[in-house]
Image: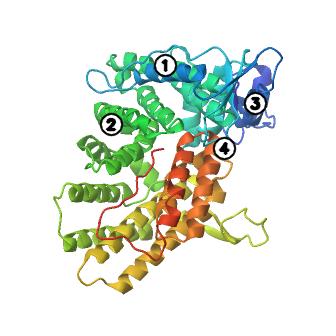
Amino acid sequence: MVYYGVVSKGCERCRRRKVKCDQRKPACLKCEKSKVECPGYRDLDNVLFRDESERIIRKVRQLDQPQSGSVNYITPGSSSHSTNHSTKNRCSQAQPGLAQEIISEPSSQPENDGLVLRRSSPASYSSALYICGPLSQPVNKLGVSFFFAKYTFNEAPFGGEYHDWLAQSYSEDGSVLHAAIDAVGMSGVSNVSYAPRVASRSKERYAKAIAAVNTALRDPVQVVADSTLMAVILLGLYETVNFATSDRYSYWVAHVKGATALLELRGPKQFTRKLGGLLYILIRSQILSACLQQHMAVPHALVRATCQFQTSIIRQQWQRNNVASQASMCEISFRIINLAAAFAKREITDIPTVQSKALDIDNDLQAWKARAPSMWGYTAIDASDAVNGAFFDTNVHVYPNLWIAETMNNWRVVRILISKLIIQAEDCSDSPDMKKKAAYLSTITKLSTDICISVSSFTGTPRIISLIRPLYVVALEELNTRDLRLFAIEQLRNIGHCVGMRQTDLLATTVAKTIDESPRDILTGPTLFTIPLIPFC
C-alpha cells in the first residue's frame, strides 16, 4: 500500500474550487448555502494509500533473475558466511538496555551493497544468490508501502484515527516514527521476498530509529509524547518480524521494559485522549506476554496504568459505545499471570488452593462473557458448499467487526489456559474428578475450534496478525485433536508468508515437532504449570 501524501478530505465541489470544506455529512455547509447538491466525499483509503503490496513484492522478486557477469553463487561457509558473521557481531551491539537509557544504539553500517535473494524455503535461510545492482524503487518506499498494507488497520472502531495519525506522523519532518516505520516495513519486504540487502537496509533504519527514540527520551516533552511510545512499540514489532531464533528475545524484552517505563511516565493524562488509550492496549498485551514467559508478576507500572485507564473518561465513552465491556478481562488476565508467578516461586504449593483460585478465575471469565454487549456475538453461516480447505469447519462465524472478533479470541485464549490449569490440578489431586476433567477438555476443544473458524474473518486484513497468539495456543495444546493442531500450524505459516513475520515460522516448526510426541489420550504428569510460551505480537 503506497503512501501518496496528505490529501484534502473535502467534498468534490470544494476541492475543485480550492476552498476549505467543513466536511459536514451528508452535505457540506458551502454546498448547502449555495443550494447545490453536495457531490459527497471520496474514499480516502483509495487515495491516501493504494494497495500495491503485490506489485512491490513482484518488483523485488524480479531482481532474482540471473544477469550476465553479475551473478556469483555463495554457499554456506564461503565469504558470505564471514560477512554474515561480522554483521551479526555488529548487530549484537544493538542490544537495548535500561541502565542509563531505555534503548542503546547499535552500529548502522550496512551489510553489503548488493542484493541477495534467498532461493530457499521460508524456514531455511542457508544458501543465497548474490546480485549486484540497485533496487528499481527506493527501499524505504517499499518498506512504508508494505508497513501500511500489512501492519496497520483502518476499520472500526479505532482504525481510522489510528491509521491517519500514523500516516500524518510519518509525513512530518524529524518524526521519531519515520525510521521505525521504515525499519519494520523493510524487514517485512525482505522476509517475503528473501532479499537480505533489503534486510541490511532495514537494520540501518532500525539503528536510526533507536537513535531517534533515545533523543526523544532526553526531551522532557517528547518523552511522554504518543509518538515516542509508538516508536518503542514499533521497535518491539521489528524484533517480532525478525524473530527467527531465541537470540533476539532479550532485545524484545528490553523494548517491552522501555515501553512499561514510558507508560508510568505518561501518567493519567494519556487517558484523556483516544489515542492514548489505544497505545496502552497495544503495549499491554506485550507486557503480559513477557510476564507470563518469565514467570513474573504483573509490574506495578502496568497495574497503576490499568487502574487509571479503567476509571478514565475514554473507557467510559467506549463502554457507552459498546466498544469496551463493563467488566475487565485485563484484570482477570492479571490474576492468571500472578498465580503462575506465585506457583513458579513456590509461594503457592498446595493443590486445593490452586484449584480454588483457578475455578474462581474461570467463573469470572464466564461472567465476563455473559455481561459482554449483546452485539459482540457472531452469526454462523453455512459454508458447506465452499471449496474444500477454504475454511476449518462447515460454518463461518461473522462478527460485527474485527475488533470484536479479536477480543473474543483473546477471551478464548485466556479461558483455554485456565481450563488447562484446572485439568492439571485435577491430575495432581488425590482423587481427580473425571467428570470435571471431561467438561474442561470439551471446553478447550470448543474454544480452539472457534479460534480456527475465526481465521476466515481475518484473512486478507492486517488484523490477521492478532491470530498469532490464539493459533499458537491451539497448536501447542496437546489436549486438542491432531486436525485442530495441524490446521493452526498451517495458518501460522500462512500468516508468516503473507505478512513477512519470521516468528510464525519458528513457532509453527517448533510446535509441529511436538505433535507426535504428545498423543491426545496421554495427559500431562504431575507438573502443574505448563502454560505455553505465548508469542509476542
Q: As shown in the figure, which amino acid type bears the numbered disc 1?
A: Ser
Q: CA distance from mark 3 to mark 2?
A: 39 Å
Badge 3 marks a residue whose secondary structure is: helix
Percent coordinates x, y for residue 379 in the rendering? 63, 69
Residue 31: numbered disc: none
Relative to 306, 450 lies left or right:
right
Q: As shown in the figure, which amino acid type bears the numbered disc 2?
A: Thr
Q: Which residue is mark 3?
A: 61
Q: Which residue is mark 2?
A: 260
Percent coordinates x, y for residue 251 in the rendering? 39, 32
The answer to whether any part of residue 311 appears in the image is: no
Badge 2 marks a residue whose secondary structure is: helix
In the current view of this chain or complex, which residue is farthest to the right? 68
Q: As shown in the figure, which amino acid type bears the numbered disc 3?
A: Arg
Front position in the image: 276 or 90? 90
Is tag 1's residue or tag 4's residue first in the polypeptide sequence? 1
Residue 498: numbered disc: 4
Q: Are marks 1 and 3 in contact (CB under 8 Å)?
A: no
Is tag 2's residue or tag 4's residue first in the polypeptide sequence? 2
The residue that appears at 41% across and 30% down in the rendered structure is 229
Badge 1 marks a residue whose secondary structure is: helix
Is tag 3's residue or tag 2's residue first in the polypeptide sequence? 3
Relative to 353, 136 lies left or right:
right
Classify residue 61 by image quadrant.
top right
Eye-nearest disc, 2 or 4: 4
Front position in the image: 284 or 344? 344
Q: Looking at the rendering, in which quadrant would you find the N terminus?
A: top right
Q: Which residue is mark 1?
A: 86
Disc 1: CA contacts within 10 A as few (<14), some (14-19) or many (>=20): few
Is tag 2's residue or tag 1's residue first in the polypeptide sequence? 1
Classify residue 95 by image quadrant.
top left
